[in-house]
Image (cartoon, rainbow, N blue to C red):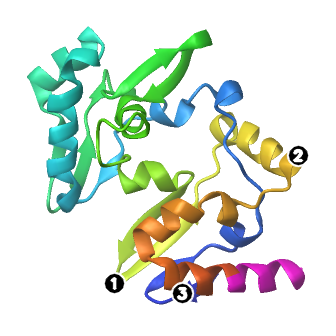
Amino acid sequence: MFRIGDTILNDDIATAKFACDVTRCKGACCVVGESGAPISKKEIPAVKKAYELLKDELRPEAVKTVEKLGVIQGDEEKGYEISCIDERECVFVDYIEEDVAVCTIQRAYFQGRFGWEKPVSCHLYPVRLKKIAGLEYANFEYIPDMCSAGCSNGEQEGIYLADFLENALVRRYGRKWFDEFIEVCKNRRNNR
């Protein structure tokens, strides 16, 4: 493990190779699991605004879930997450060719219709963050069924997880933090 600022990072974040291959994993990170994407309290207004903008584009079961449960679950003590359909797929999931799950928020962002890309936790995946005793812990959450395609694609393309997540990490921590982080990553790779 190593530390940058107030964040403790797992060594795998520096040394693992990874680059999403959504054609192979089918967007599993948006549909597998028992809970929705973690979001911060400050992200709640953006998620609610996204729902209002995209409601007519969402699948009927997603709208039904939001009408029943709300778009956000949780509280300040336990944390917040986006609601899921039947404790599986995110309400913002849409499917494209060959049953590939995509994020409607991100699609609207890339189309220039929404000014927020997606929750930071989604942007950072497969890295998950957890706060403990005032420090943030970042861990590469490797789940074989979901991440093996990304790992083999990263190996094939020669892309490190740390580099793949540059935009997400800059968004979360800032450019100065990322520049320090990437130098530590390079040193850790060279000393293996």
Q: Mark 3 — residue?
A: 4
Counting residues from the N terminus, which is met first, the one under dot 2 or under dot 1?
A: 1
Counting residues from the N terminus, which is met first, the one under dot 2 or under dot 3?
A: 3
Q: Quadrant of the C terminus?
A: bottom right
Q: Is residue 83 left or right of residue 18?
A: left
Kind of element beneath mark 1: loop
Picture coordinates of residue 58, whole percent (x, y): 28, 18
Bin the neighbour count of mark 3 within 10 Å (Cα to Cα): few under 14, some 14-19, many 20 and up. few
**Tag 2 near tag 3, CB within 8 Å:** no
For image coordinates 57% across by 52% down, the residue present is 126
Q: Quadrant of residue 52?
A: top left
Residue in the foreground of this view, choosing between 172 and 33? 172
Picture coordinates of residue 150, whole percent (x, y): 72, 43
* Residue 30 drawn above or below residue 19: above
Q: In 3D space, how far apart are the residues under numbered discs 1 and 3 (Cα atoms)? A: 16 Å
Q: Mark 2 — residue?
A: 156
Q: Mark 1 — residue?
A: 133
Q: In 3D space, how far apart are the residues under numbered discs 2 and 1 (Cα atoms)? A: 39 Å
Q: Magenta segment, which residues?
A: 183-192
For image coordinates 70% across by 85% down, the residue present is 183
For image coordinates 43% across by 66% down, the residue present is 171
Number of numbered discs: 3
Q: In 3D space, how far apart are the residues under numbered discs 2 and 3 (Cα atoms)? A: 29 Å
Residue type of the residue flagged with mark 3: Ile
For image coordinates 35% across by 50% down, the residue present is 119
Picture coordinates of residue 25, whole percent (x, y): 65, 29
Counting residues from the N terminus, which is met first, the one under dot 1 or under dot 3?
A: 3
Kind of element beneath mark 3: strand
